[in-house]
Amino acid sequence: MPDKVPNKLPAEFADLEPFSDWCLASEPLRYAKRLASTMTEIQAFYDAITPRAEEAISYCDKFPLDDLPEDVLNLLHLLYSMVTVSFPVECWKQPRVPDSGATWLDCVAEPVP
């Protein structure tokens, strides 16, 4: 029998585990994931994380920002990904910024951790 893959998120957020591939540590990775995802995938992630966002923020606030346990850091990264997909879901209805063609955005600063 294969070993069980360890959960990336705190047990309190086990329902979000199917979306743990959105636990990405940098903005360029989150942006690339958004562009590589369908709106169906993005919408499913958004619909799952948004109702839990306030609870997730409160959970993260229990820990010092410079010493987050790995599962809590993953939860924070999941929240960052929620922000990354919010405009495509709420405004544009597509992963890419409308009328942006092949334009690519590179951020030079992002939230840490």
Image: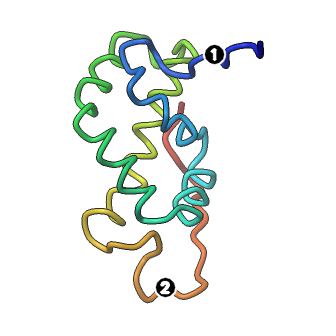
Residue at the spot x=52%, y=15% of the render? Answer: 68
Q: Quadrant of residue 61?
A: top left
Which badge, 1 or 2, comes first in the chain's sequence? 1
Q: Is 78 situated above or below 92?
A: above
* Pick the front one: 80 or 3: 3
Q: Amino acid at mark 1?
A: Pro
Query: Residue 35, how many percent across, how many down?
Result: 55, 66
Residue beneath label 2, please? 100
Residue at the spot x=36%, y=66% of the render? Answer: 88
**Element type at mark 2:** loop
User: Which circle, 1 or 2, is nearer the viewer?
Assistant: 1
Residue beneath label 1, please? 6
Specify whether 67 is left or right of 65. right
**Element type at mark 1:** loop
Residue at the spot x=25%, y=23% of the render? Answer: 55
Q: Is 3 situated above or below 39?
A: above
Q: Quadrant of residue 33?
A: bottom right
Circles 1, 2 touching at the beta carbon (< 8 Å):
no
* Pick the front one: 113 or 23: 23
Q: Quadrant of residue 26?
A: top right
Query: Residue 32, how many percent across, how many down?
Result: 61, 60
